[in-house]
Amino acid sequence: MKNFLVSFFFGMILFSCNKKENKWNISTEKLNSKLEVIDIRKEYYSSMSLDEFRQKYPFYLSDSTADEVYEQQRKDPAELKINEEITKKLSLVDLNQELETLFEHIQYYFPKFIAPKVYLTNSMFSDDILFNPVFYQVETNSVFIACDYFLGNGNIFYNNKEINLDKYVQRSMNPENIVPKVAFAISENILPFDKSKKDFLNYIVYYGKMMTLQDAFLPETSDEWKIGYTKEEIEWCRTNEYNMWNYFIKNDYLFSDNEDLLKRFIYPAPFSKFFTFDEDNKSVDLDSPGQAGIWLGWQIMRSYFQNNSDVKLEKVLANTDFQEIFNQAKYKPER
């Protein structure tokens, strides 16, 4: 009996500790509006007439494109194969449930939030949306998801001669990346970026806030899906966190307004450009993921909430003094 009690209390302590580890684990209520996920592509590639389709989805087809072009597109063997692949790879039941959970979390922090209509489409790998396959239209409160961009890293369609997508782009093209990208698209509306703030630190902390919203809205989602890294890239960042941060400090980057830093550490790229080499003169950069500045901003904000656990999320989001946030974060990565 004594051993049982010891195990029980030890288990309770562990449970309490684990619960404290993630402050974003909260209890949500059901959505106050019904979630609608509308699979446009299913009807677009069906026997439905174009007139009927246009009547149902007047916003989807361009008036400047002849009907013959659309008719040919709907019968194109390559498009039909990709559309079949989408059906195989994506579970609409799972997606519906995950989106509902996401929207419930957003509504918890922002009670006025109304769940948007969600439209599933097939973009046929349009270059225009390569890095933004999820679009949130504020005016109509609609989310558009280009499903062909979430078939899985290494998918045969991504590596054929016609499409041939870069490996670094593919790492965030998994079904698991859909909901985080929806969360990010909505977060950009919740937290617009002030373009008048040019310092590199402002970018780092801003994107750290954006990733904090990912933590709050998707507390059960793994870090790699939120930021679009592989597990190996997450591990690389953890192992090299001190070195990356020390590099920024040593080079006086934090208060620099050099736009080149955004290309090197914020914008999508195959790797982050530290211009660093090991003892064998091999580039260390090639092992790093792109957007390392965003990852570090994320860790700064995690440090902030660890050291300021009583501060409400909404208050931090409203604070545009990024240097004050940085100072209060007391961020100091270990060697």
Image (cartoon, rainbow, N blue to C red):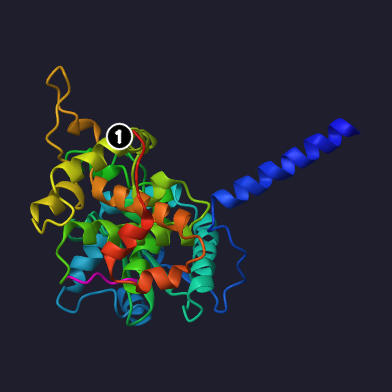
Question: Quarter-wise, where is residue 45 in the image?
Answer: bottom left
Q: Can residue 121 be seen in this view?
A: no
What amino acid does circle 1 point to?
Asn
Q: Is mark 1 on a helix, strand or loop?
A: loop
Q: How crowded is mark 1: few (under 14 residues within 10 Å), some or many (20 or more)?
A: some
Q: Position of residue 208 (x, y in %)?
A: 33, 57
Q: Where is residue 307 in the image (x, y as percent from the top left)?
A: 45, 55
Rendered position, 60 above or below 214: below
Question: Quarter-wise, where is residue 2 in the image?
Answer: top right
**What residue is pinned by disc 1?**
240
Residue at left offset 33%, top offset 71%: 191
Question: Quarter-wise, where is residue 166 in the image?
Answer: top left
Q: Assign the magenta stretch its main secondary structure.
A: loop
Magenta stretch: give its range.
191-195
The residue lying toward the viewer, choosing from 310 and 138, is 310
In the rendered view of the protein, which quadrant contains the N terminus? top right
